[in-house]
Image (cartoon, grey):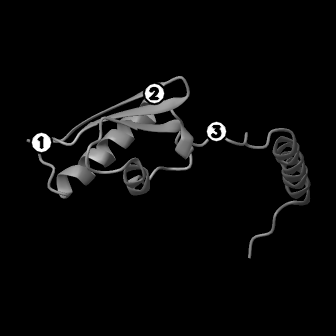
Amino acid sequence: MRCIEPDKFAAHAAVSRQLSIVLLVLAICCPPAPGLALERKQFVVRNNRVIIDEVYWAILDLPKWARPDEKTAKLVRRQILRFLRKSGYLLARVKVRAERGRLIVDVDEGQL
């Protein structure tokens, strides 16, 4: 069994304590900001004729980091389009854009 030299152990312990203190201060001073995750009221569906807005919201599987931004807009578009295609709406088109802190979802369900 290999032993740690006393000087190295003391230095390691000091660094660990300092790191713990820094992390504690960050956790206290910088908690995650509430309300930044995408909320239902920031999700606006337009032009849908068959499927109600709540269904589109319910099918989304968004990560915790999801915000009303372009990155999330691409993810939402992909998920809604996949849902529509699996549901038989082969002519469906979806456009999603981030605008003023909201995601605007334009849905054309492709009815003939």
Can you tell which mark lies on residue 1? Answer: none
64 relative to 3 in the view: left or right: left
- Residue sticking out furthest to the front: 49
Element at badge 2? Answer: strand
Between residue 64 and residue 59, name the one nearer to us. 59
Q: Amino acid at mark 3?
A: Leu
Residue drawn at the location 45% of the way across and 37% of the way down: 44
The residue mark sitting in front, 2 or 1, is 1
- Residue picked out by circle 3: 36
Q: Nearer the viewer, residue 18 or 85?
A: 85
55 vs 93, left or right, is right
- Front tag of 3 and 1: 1
Q: Which residue is mark 2?
A: 98
Specify whether 107 is left or right of 31: left
Furthest-bottom residue in this view: 1
Mark 3 and mark 1 lie on one chain; the one further toward the N terminus is 3
Residue 26, how many percent across, how many down? 82, 41
Q: Distance between the Cα atoms at labels 3 and 2?
A: 14 Å
Residue 91, numbered label: 1
Distance between the alpha carbons at the discs numbered 3 and 1: 34 Å
Marks 2 and 1 sit apart, C-alpha to C-alpha, by 24 Å
Quadrant of the rendered structure where residue 37 is? top right
Tell me, yes or no, if residue 50 can be seen here: yes
Image quadrant in which you'd find residue 35: top right
Q: Is residue 26 left or right of residue 73?
A: right
Tell me residue 66's x, y (percent): 52, 42
Identify the residue at image location x=37%, y=41%.
75
Q: Amino acid at mark 2?
A: Ala
Asked if disc 3 and disc 1 are in contact, CB closer than 8 Å, the reply is no
Q: Amino acid at mark 1?
A: Leu
N-term-proximal mark, 3 vs 2: 3
| Secondary structure type for disc 1 | loop
